[in-house]
Image: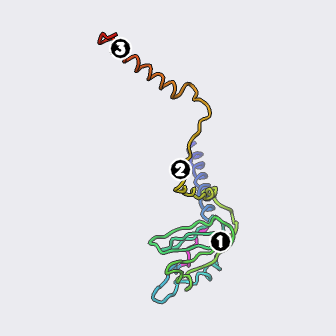
């Protein structure tokens, strides 16, 4: 009985290892620029790598990640992306198929003009993993325009009497209570 349990445990462990290995190979983390990284030498106005050459030697698929040191990207599909300097390593998931552009907008675009830019083509590959397959956010709706200063806020027009008496009942009730209090006060004084 112990041998059966031990065999079952070994089979489960092997199955988990195979599953983990397959999942690890399914998607790729691409370090931008390879070993050279994503850096710009402002003294020489040179990048640490030829990013277009680096990108041309990569295969990008949905679910892969771009990883870069000291970059903070803002991504716009098929339009482009601005990458600004920051003090962090960041991973950007590739969630849209097609051509995408990444570039540095530091120094008013000067770094981009000196080679801090690259283009990639993202293929479908295995598709998005469930962790990245989220519905898109709702479309942006601009806030309503400010009201003109000359206009007053809208008023509510009531075309029927309130149900259950509303204010009229309350006013009548308080009026009756007031009359009763006056009469009781005269009775207490003995003037009636």
In this figure, which residue is indicated by the disc labeled 1? 60
Label 1 with label 2: CB-CB less than 8 Å? no
- Residue 109 forms part of the magenta stretch: no
Magenta stretch in the rendered image: 27-34
The residue positioned 66% from the left and 72% from the top of the image is 78
Nearest the viewer among 158 and 74 is 158
In the image as oriented, which residue stretches furthest toward the left? 189
Distance Cα–Cα, label 1 vs label 2: 57 Å
**Alpha carbon separation for disc pair 3 and 1:** 91 Å
- Residue 102 image label: none
Q: Nearer the viewer, residue 119 or 165?
A: 165
Q: Mark 1 Cα within 10 Å, few/some/many (few <14, many 20+)?
A: many
In terms of depth relative to the viewer, which is nearer, 144 or 17? 144
Residue at image mark 3: 184
Instruction: Pick the residue in front: 42 or 123.
Output: 42
Q: Is residue 41 left or right of residue 56?
A: left
* Position of 92 relative to 38 (above/below): above
Residue 64 screen position, x and y as percent: 61, 67
Q: Quadrant of residue 114?
A: bottom right
- Compared to residue 155, the image places residue 183 above or below, namely above
Q: Is residue 32 magenta?
A: yes
Q: Position of residue 68 (x, y in %)?
A: 52, 73
| Quadrant holding the N terminus | top right
Residue 124 image position (x, y, % from top left): 70, 66
Label 3 vs 1, first from the N-terminus: 1
Q: Residue furthest front?
A: 191
Q: Can the viewer see residue 69 in this picture?
A: no
Q: Residue at x 55, y 25 (%)?
A: 165
Could one spot residue 73 in this view of the protein? Answer: yes
Residue 152, labelled with which disc? 2
């Amino acid at each position: 009985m112990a041998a059966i349990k031990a065999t079952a445990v070994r089979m489960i462990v092997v199955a988990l290892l195979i599953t983990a290995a397959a999942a690890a190979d399914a998607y790729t983390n691409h370090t931008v620029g390879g070993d050279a990284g994503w850096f710009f030498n402002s003294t020489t106005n040179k990048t640490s790598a030829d990013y277009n050459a680096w990108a041309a030697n990569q295969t990008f698929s949905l679910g892969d990640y771009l990883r870069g040191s000291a970059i903070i990207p803002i991504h716009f599909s098929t339009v482009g992306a601005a990458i600004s300097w920051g003090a962090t390593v960041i991973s950007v998931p590739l969630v849209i198929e097609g051509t995408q552009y990444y570039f540095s907008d530091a120094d008013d675009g000067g770094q981009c003009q000196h080679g801090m830019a690259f283009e990639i083509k993202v293929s479908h590959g295995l598709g998005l993993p469930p962790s990245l397959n989220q519905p898109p956010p709702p479309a942006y709706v601009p806030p309503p325009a400010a009201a003109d200063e000359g206009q007053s806020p809208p008023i509510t027009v009531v075309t029927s009497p309130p149900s259950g008496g509303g204010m009229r009942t309350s006013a009548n009730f308080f009026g009756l209570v007031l009359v009763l209090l006056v009469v009781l006060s005269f009775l207490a004084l003995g003037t009636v």
